[in-house]
Image: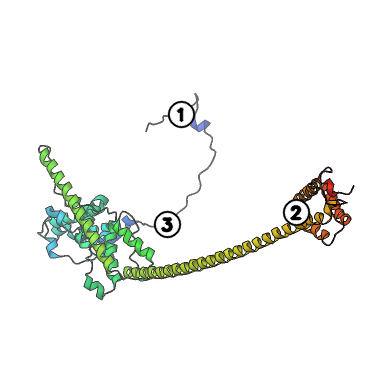
Amino acid sequence: MSATVMTLPTLPDGWVGEKDFKAIGSLSPATQRHIEPVGPHFLAHARRKRHHRTFSEDERMQAQENVKKVEDDDAGEISEPEDPAMLQRDAKDWKNQDHYAVLGLTKYRFLATEDQIKRAHRKKVLKHHPDKKAAAGSTEDDSFFKCIQKATEVLLDPVKRRQFDSVDEEADLDPPSKKETQKGNFFKLWGPVFEREGRFSKKQPVPKLGNDKSTKAEVEAFYDFWYNFDSWRSFEYQDEDVPDDNENRDQKRHVERKNNNARKKKKTEDTARLRHLVDDALALDERIKKFKKEERAHKDKRKIEKEAEAKRAAEEAQKQKEEQAKAKAEAEEKAKTEKADAKKLKEAAKNAAKKNKRVLKGSVKDVNYFHEGGDAPPAIIDAVLNDVDLLISKIDNEELAVVATKLNGKKDAASVKGVYSDEVKRLIEGGKLKPSEATTLANK
């Protein structure tokens, strides 16, 4: 950082302090205050005076008290008896040591927090530091202290700790046997097993095993999760050490390939192990048997209902078929009867029309074809009969019957011709006949 140089203005020429200085204020009067010595340094001084200690003696006594305080603070949470054999471990064999056991965290293992690891390290260091042992007259080497340092280094490094946790067999929990499961509580025996295995899952949280009240969807989701388990577990921690020298590169590549193949093999074996574990749990899970039984009962019920519905539908179809056949037969019979009746009516109408036609033709014959004085000549007969046929062709059977009724009982030519004349007139007015037609039947 550069310094800033400020230049004060120069005093005017001839300026004298005694003559030119002007005071703009005055000092306050002096105040007497009582000062008490405080702070850690004064307390240390007072402690040394009181106990007649030198500086070195006081520092040593304070260090011992701090150690005891740390041990007392961690005695409840982080306090495990030390195995004498573990204290004799060779620090060079650090890969095969149980880092959690070295720090006294075996009851926590992969669940141990960073704070617990640091506190355990501090407690072990205070107890096994080489300087402290040397001061106490111990001739032990610092091998176990190096084990402590290495354990702390591994467990405080997230990558190294995950690698160690991947192969920490002490944290595994063996699944119960079939006999143990059948005798005990399935959920209490298998629940902790899946909780331990769940620590390797990339997907969190891991679904719980549940209980006998769990729904079918929850149970299926649980086993589906484990059959598609996505594990982060790796086995780098068990790799063979790769040479660091650059001279033997072929050996280095050989070791790396060997380690890579060993990891793949262990990963495959671990996947098969987990699959077998899930298969065993599924086979022993009474809920699966209950769900299958309920499903079979549901299928049987649906089958019975389906068969009953099919039977009802078949009976309904048969009944409908019979009704349709009956209705068809009745319709055919009715149509046949109606046809016969229509035929009879038609025949009767035809016969009536023939009769009525005979009546009309007989009526003109009875009055000698309207000819006076002897038998009517053939020409007149033909003319009158042709006009009668023309009139008959212009009227329907009902009109024919009306005309025939009017002609019944009439024997004189005038009456007969009057009936014909009225009918001819009606047909002409109706546009069915021309005035020039049927003139033999009309009155002049």
Residue count near mark 1 (Cα–Cα under 10 Å), binned few <14, some 14–19, many ≥20: few
Residue pointed to by mark 3:
34
How busy is the neighbourhood of tag 2: few (under 14 within 10 Å), some, or many (20 plus)?
A: few
The residue identified by callout 1 is 8
Rendered-image quadrant of the N terminus: top left
Residue lying furthest right: 444
Q: Position of residue 46 (x, y in %)?
A: 30, 60
Q: Which residue is most to the bottom? A: 183
SS label for mark 3: loop
Judge whether residue 232 can be spotted in this image: yes
Residue 296 percent coordinates (x, y) = 35, 69
Q: Is residue 60 above or below residue 385?
A: below
What residue sits right under mark 2 in the picture? Answer: 396
Which one is nearer the viewer's eye here, 194 or 397? Answer: 397
Q: Earlier in the sequence, mark 3 or mark 2?
A: 3
Residue 350 sits above or below residue 385 on the image: below
Identify the amino acid type marked 1. Answer: Leu
Residue 207 shows in this picture:
no
Q: Is mark 3 in CB contact (under 8 Å) with mark 2?
A: no
- Assess disc 3: are there few (<14), some (14-19) or many (≥20) residues with their C-alpha within 10 Å of its C-alpha: few
Q: Distance between the residues labelled 3 and 1?
A: 41 Å
| Residue type (three-letter) at the residue carrying disc 3 | His
